[in-house]
DNA sequence: GTGAAAGCGCTAACAA
DNA sequence: TTGTTAGCGCTTTCAC
């Protein structure tokens, strides 16, 4: 392909290249017929005023003749002019973009966190860029790189150890949503899974359950983070002297169907369990639905306990008992921490933030 | 029609004209001692090389001595250097940001659309900024202004007539998600609510229902857009010669609770309705839940038909029959249209895109 | 009320 | 391999 073929029409003749646009690079991602940018200078020229006057008109400044302003505005619109946010951002240093990294938009947990983040960001006049990783290892690493390039601060759910390390090692103000049991040097919000899980399990045991199964997230099994929920399950059962059959622990894909499939597997081998403690509500709901479809009564034959406190837990029958996390608050706190970091606070100066899951008794357990 | 001619009186459409203030006012949350930016020149100076060499190191270019690179990188990290995305964006014209405007992250409809948008954007290497309006009039207008300032193209759900007009009148490539019955000059995706609603109503009528209530969105009542679902309801009932009691039409807040409250109001006055056609699944689910709580059997005493085809419809008992919209595809198409616009296509050159809601028979009707 | 000049921080082209 | 030069498009002084 010849060079000329890649050059937008009218910018470069066959003979000599007009040097004005000669330095533009043409990335393969950009369609070749990309609308060339209309600049403030072009508007100025077309209107016969200086570019500052155009700037004044566009920015609604006072020191300008109303008539001139209107003329400029009309021309600007007609020419399709829009100020470049890059040029503006370069000169006005106050435009802040926050990167929000979530695992899965379709899991209702994340929209709630997102709502908190968006609200807190909006209060500060920040804009929010959203990235979805699916908790894939490769994707997480990629997204961390993007973060460095594209935003002023990051707030993220990250499952994989190296992605977290990379994010924390960069120069970007970075907050971990669900900090887990990680080193205190990484700022973030800790969700007290241990406390929550303990409260839930003790509730189940208090209700007389002994054969309590656990539907664990298969992703969490592969991630290098310590899985607080399963550990706690084992510990509490141990403390109470309740023997645990390894078959009671089933990995589940993090989805309704995943929960259902895991439940079916569980029942085929261990029909005698009387309660299920799930990694989260989505898995719990899938499991409960399947259990009922298979003829079990809930909670009489089998009780279900979720984790997260999603509102969709109220839709199933019976409504799901769960450990409720204030997800909106989680998002808000993370933004507050990001603001502190951005203001120059050291990573160790960020106050410890812990979200305490609360037992929300509905009817499934 | 000229671009300028479509601009509403008193609006300017370019830059941020009728804004609250030119300069964004800072919330008290942001401390004033913002960390001053470390620049590439400072790193260059500290390392004793030129800034171009720093640039090469940072961008992992090949024409640089590995040892120099490492020295620069170390210094950069130590100094807390991060390239300015504005300066970069100014010189590399290929960084594209898409603005996605949704009404409510917490309504599962939007995460699904968002998933489609994020995926399509990622394929193109675009980043996505998300704005949430709550369908509030003021917010919609504000967000449109932000769009002009902050992104290269916008894809939006907008309820209010003037917000749409403003967005369409600006120089920003703009795509309306759910274009409704609006002027063809606004690019966007049309969801065929008429076709969907007709299919749904004929299904109900075919099942023998005559006293069919409609739970309408109270927001849609206030928005200036024609409410296709209610119009169709009236029209189809009229065509079939089925008399409609105005009391059968209840406005509902767009939420589970809103649907429940509306259902309760409906039942208190019109216990004899045999089917409910809801504005969307969220309202339908709330209504169905409340109806069952009040002792009605579904679908025997009262059938329920939703709109949207949300997956949460599968969680309730009985699973919700609904008009399914391919929300993910909707998001993808919108991004494709935005790409065309960005590539310089005229508004009238955008191919017509229509999403056809499909009757998804589960068990509630 | 308007214009000229001086950058903001970075990368691409070219020179050394 | 490295440095120098020339902008990218805009806003902010500071003159006029």
Image (tube, coloured by chain):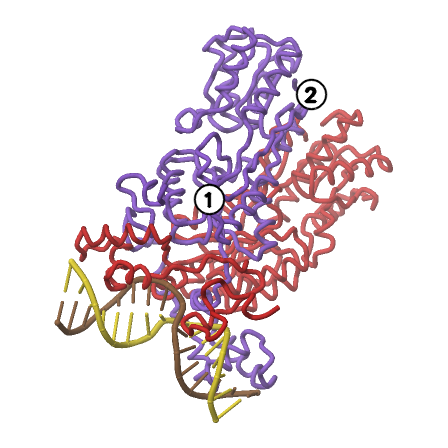
Chain colours: A red, B purple, C yellow, D brown
Choose between B304 and A303: the one closer to the eye. B304
Secondary structure beneath dot 1 equals helix
| Residue A266, percent from left and from top | 81, 38
Image: A49 above or below A16: above
Q: Nearer the viewer, mark 2 or mark 1?
A: 1
Q: Residue at x 23, y 50 (%)?
A: A70
Q: Residue at x 34, y 50 (%)?
A: A78
Secondary structure beneath dot 2 equals loop
Choose between B314 and D12: the one closer to the eye. D12
Where the C terminus of chain B falls, by quadrant?
Answer: top right
**Alpha-carbon neighbours of circle 2 within 10 Å: few (<14), some, or many (≥20)?**
some
Seen in the image, is A333 located left or right of residue B5? right
User: Gap between marks 2 and 1, in whole Å?
Assistant: 43 Å
Specify the label residue B363 is tagged with.
Answer: 2
Q: Is residue B48 visible?
A: no
Q: Chain of mark 1?
A: B
Residue found at the far front of this picture:
A15
Q: Is residue B227 visible?
A: yes
| Residue A233, percent from left and from top | 72, 46
Quarter of image, res D12: bottom left
Where the N terminus of chain B falls, by quadrant?
Answer: top left
| Pointers 2 and 1 within a single chain | yes
| Residue B131, percent from left and from top | 46, 45
């Amino acid at each position: 392909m010849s060079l000329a073929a890649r050059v937008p029409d009218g910018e470069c003749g066959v003979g000599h290249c007009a040097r004005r646009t000669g330095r533009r690079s043409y990335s393969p991602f950009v369609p070749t017929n990309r609308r060339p940018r209309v600049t403030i200078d072009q508007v100025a020229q077309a209107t016969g005023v200086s570019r500052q006057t155009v700037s004044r008109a566009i920015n609604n400044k006072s020191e300008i003749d109303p008539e001139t302003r209107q003329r400029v505005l009309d021309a600007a619109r007609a020419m399709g002019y829009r100020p470049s946010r890059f040029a503006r951002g370069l000169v006005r240093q106050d435009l802040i973009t926050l990167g929000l990294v979530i695992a899965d938009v379709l899991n209702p947990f994340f929209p709630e966190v997102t709502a908190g983040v968006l609200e807190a960001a909006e209060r500060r006049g920040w804009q929010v860029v959203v990235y979805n990783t699916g908790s894939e290892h490769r994707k997480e690493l990629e997204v961390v790189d993007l973060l460095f390039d594209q935003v002023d601060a990051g707030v993220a759910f990250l499952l994989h150890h190296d992605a977290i390390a990379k994010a924390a090692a960069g120069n970007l103000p970075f907050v971990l949503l669900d900090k887990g049991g990680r080193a205190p040097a990484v700022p973030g919000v800790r969700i007290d899974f241990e406390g929550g899980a303990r409260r839930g399990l003790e509730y189940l045991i208090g209700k007389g359950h002994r054969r309590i199964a656990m539907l664990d997230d298969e992703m969490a099994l592969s991630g290098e983070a310590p899985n607080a929920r399963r550990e706690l399950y084992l510990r509490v059962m141990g403390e109470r002297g309740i023997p645990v059959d390894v078959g009671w622990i089933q990995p589940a894909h993090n989805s309704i169907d995943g929960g259902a499939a895991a439940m079916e597997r569980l029942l085929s081998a261990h029909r005698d369990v009387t309660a299920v403690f799930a990694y989260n509500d989505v898995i719990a709901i899938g499991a409960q639905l399947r259990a009922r479809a298979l003829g079990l009564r809930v909670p009489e034959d089998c009780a279900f306990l979720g984790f997260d406190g999603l509102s969709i837990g109220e839709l199933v029958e019976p409504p799901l008992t769960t450990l409720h996390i204030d997800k909106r608050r989680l998002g808000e706190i993370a933004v507050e921490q990001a603001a502190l970091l951005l203001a120059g606070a050291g990573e160790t100066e960020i106050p410890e933030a812990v979200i305490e899951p609360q037992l929300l008794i509905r009817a499934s357990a």
